[in-house]
Amino acid sequence: MVNPPRPHQPIRPLWLCRTCAAPWPCATARLALLREYADDRVALLVYLGGQLHDAADELYRLNPHDGPEPRQLFDRFLGWALIRLARDGPRVDRFVVSARAAPSGTGSSGSPRSETGPAESR
Ligand SMILES: [Zn+2]
């Protein structure tokens, strides 16, 4: 099966929508992604996680002193999809819980922590 093209693609490394210039994923891109991954929401999260990883790297490289906060990037790339998944039923709640309960990295354990993970430092 061939998916229809998604015109609302990001301009990298700016991560703005090529069509509407909104921060990517724009509303239209989100709807298209939900349609495209309607049968495999976990694959959607994996895809968005990869995009988040790339965007965090590129946006911080572009503007290392005034880039977006990790929490903002998380909400922008993954938060919206997790909220939608949580509404679909209890089976996916564990994804929300595991994503929100990421280790905060406090203490001296030196646990590796992605700079793109959810910010827990508020
Ligand atoms: Zn767009």
Image (tube, helix red, strand yellow):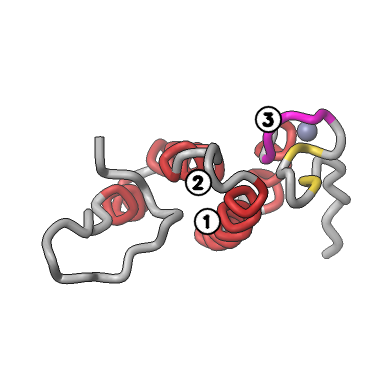
User: In which quadrant will I find the C terminus?
Assistant: top left
Q: Which region shows up in magenta?
A: 20-24
Quadrant in the picture for residue 63: top right
Whole-number angstrom distance, CA of label 3 to CA of label 1:
16 Å
Marks 2,1: beta carbons within 8 A: yes
Counting residues from the start of the chain, the first of labels 3 and 2 encountered is 3
Chief SS of the magenta region: loop
For ligand 1, which image quadrant applies?
A: top right
Specify the amino acid type for callout 1: Leu
Residue at the image position 33 percent from the left and 44 percent from the top? 119
Tell me: residue 78, above or below residue 61: above
Left or right, 80 with reference to 29: left
- Please tell me whether mark 2 sits on a helix, a strand or a loop: helix
Is disc 3 placed on a helix, strand or loop?
helix
Q: Is residue 108 within the magenta segment?
A: no
Question: Which of pointers 3 and 1 lies earlier in the amino acid sequence?
Answer: 3
Mark 2 or 1: in front is 2
Label annotation for residue 78: 2
Pinpoint residue 110: horizontal percent, then vertical percent.
21, 70
For disc 3, the marked residue is 27
Per the image, the residue denoted by label 1 is 45
